[in-house]
Each structure stands twice: as structure tokens, then as C-alpha cells.
Amino acid sequence: MLEISNGPVRIASADDADSLLRMCRMIHAESKTPEPFSADRTREVLEKVLPHGRNDINAGHTWIAVIGDHGRLKASSYLTIETPLFSAVPFLHQLWAFVDPEYRRSPYFQSLRSFAERRADELRMEARLIASHPAMDRLYGRMERYQPVGTVYSYRGNCA
């Protein structure tokens, strides 16, 4: 059982849905993807993870970790277990690790990264992060435990 002891990091609840949607809108804007942002699609994805018990640290295969109070999130990270198309070896995919611009000088990014690493270590899996905006690329690119593969950064930790 994984206990959360990463400082201010907690598992998101349904009460965080609106704040997460706002944060996803910021992630999309910073990533400069050509597709338009879809609040409906984003809410649909969040609603699959956030119902009571589905986002519990010991349940399921997808977690959203957050920092901040309900209605005023400062940072978030989306983790899910995936299996590549051409392999049977699953990995922990960190779809985002995002800190609100107002808090970028805080240690929140490191707290989210530490949470993902601890989760990967417990699951004995490799963790991968897609660098979705330049700030993440710069942060992960400087970390010695991460090996870049294009814009994917891989943490091997305790995986076999």
C-alpha cells in the first residue's frame, strides 16, 4: 500500500473537477497544440478518474495527484498505467505534471515528480513523462535520473 508523504501532494477528488478543468485549459494553451481545447472531452476524461474510490491511491490504474485546496489547485499530475503498442511491458505514464504559473518558483514540481517516482518504484515500473511544454522539457532535461527519448523522459527507478 502506498502512503502519501510527499508534502503537500494529495489524491484529487470529484470536488477538484472544476479546478482541474481550469488547469487542463492552461496546459493546452501552453502546449500550443493545433487542436482546439474541448472542455466537454476533458471533463469526460476527468469524470472517469475522479468518482469516489476510482482515484484512490490503492485502486485502479489511473491517478490524479494535486497540490492545493479544493477550488484553488496550484499543481497537478496525471498518472496512468499503459502498455505500449508493440510490447507487453507496462509502464507508468505521466501525462502531465503542471504547476500554475503563479507557483512555478515553488518546490511543487519536484513534489509531483517525487510522487510519480514513488508510485513507479512501488509498482516496479518505468515511469515516462511526455514533455508537453518547454518548461517541463527544461526541468526534466536537467535531471540525471531521467533519460530523454525525443521529448519523452524516462525514470527507471526500481523496475527490473
Image: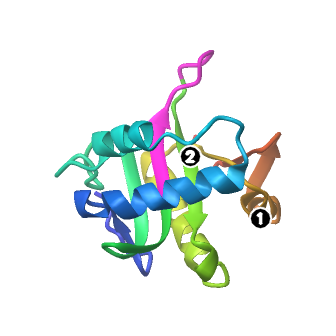
Q: Mark 2: few, some, or many residues within 10 Å (few <14, many ≥20)? A: some
Q: Nearer the viewer, residue 43 or 114?
A: 43
Q: Is residue 28 visible?
A: yes
Residue 121 visible (yes or no): no
Q: Which residues are magenta?
A: 77-88
Picture quadrant where residue 126 is located: top right
Residue 16's place in the image compared with 100, above or below, is above
Residue at 61% x, 38% y: name it: 36
How many numbered markers are drawn? 2
Task: Tell me the residue that label 2 is attached to.
Answer: 95
Question: Tag 1 or tag 2, which sits nearer the N-term?
Answer: 2
Q: Nearer the viewer, residue 110 or 40?
A: 40
Q: Within 10 angstroms of label 1, few (less than 14), some, or many (20 or more) residues?
A: few
Quick check: 52 left or right of 58? left
Secondary structure beneath dot 2 equals strand
In the picture, the quarter occupied by the C terminus is top right
Residue denoted by label 1: 143
Which residue lies at the image location 38% right of the left edge and 50% below the top edge? 63
Q: Is residue 118 above or below residue 59?
A: below
**Residue 87 appears at what percent x and percent y?**
59, 19
